[in-house]
Amino acid sequence: MPDPVPDPVPDPVAEGARAVARSLGLTADVETALRARRPDQYVDPVALASLIVSAAALAWTVYRDLRKKTDTPSADVVTRTVRTELRRSRTLTTRDDEIITLTVQETLTAMHSTQEGSGDAKT
C-alpha cells in the first residue's frame, strides 16, 4: 500500500484569503494571485488589506466627485486618480498598481450593481 500524500504545510495567509474571496465572490482572482506568489514571499496582510480598503474607499469618493461633472466617469480616469492620490502617502510597487486597478474595477462593478438594483442612477 503506498504511503499517503502528506498534507501541504498550513498557510494561514492563503486560507484567510480564500475565505474572504469566497465571501466576496473573488475566488478565481485570489487563486490566481496565490499561484503567482513565490513560496518565499510573505505578504503583510494588514498592509495589503489597508491598501485594498483605501483604494476601494477612494474609488467610491472619486467616482462620486466625477459624477458631478459627467454622468459616466471612465474607469481609467477613476483608477488613475486613485493611484495618484495613494502615491501622495505611500510608495507603490507594480503589484500595488495591479491591486489598485483590480480594487477600483471591483468597487465600480459593485457600485453599478447596487445602482441598478435600487434604480438609483445618480449615486
Image (spheres, rainbow, N blue to C red):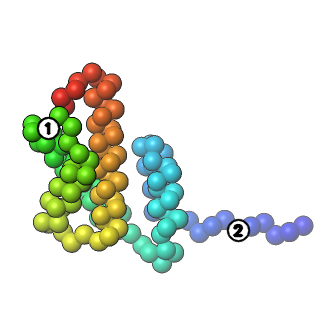
Give me the residue at 31% from left, 26% from top. 116
Give me the residue at 39% from left, 69% from top. 43
Q: Which residue is mark 2?
A: 6
**Is residue 12 at all visible to an observer of this figure?**
no
Q: Which residue is mark 1?
A: 70
Q: Position of residue 11 (x, y in %)?
A: 52, 65
The earlier-in-sequence mark between 2 and 1 is: 2
Quadrant in the picture for the N terminus: bottom right
Give me the residue at 18% from left, 29% from top. 122
Q: Position of residue 28 (x, y in %)?
A: 51, 51
15 relative to 88, above or below: above
In the foreground, 47 or 28? 28
Q: Give the secondary structure at mark 2.
A: loop
Q: Amino acid at mark 1?
A: Thr
39 relative to 32, above or below: below
- CA gap, disc 2 and disc 1: 57 Å
Q: Position of residue 46 (x, y in %)?
A: 31, 62
Circle on res. 51: none
In the foreground, 80 or 29? 80
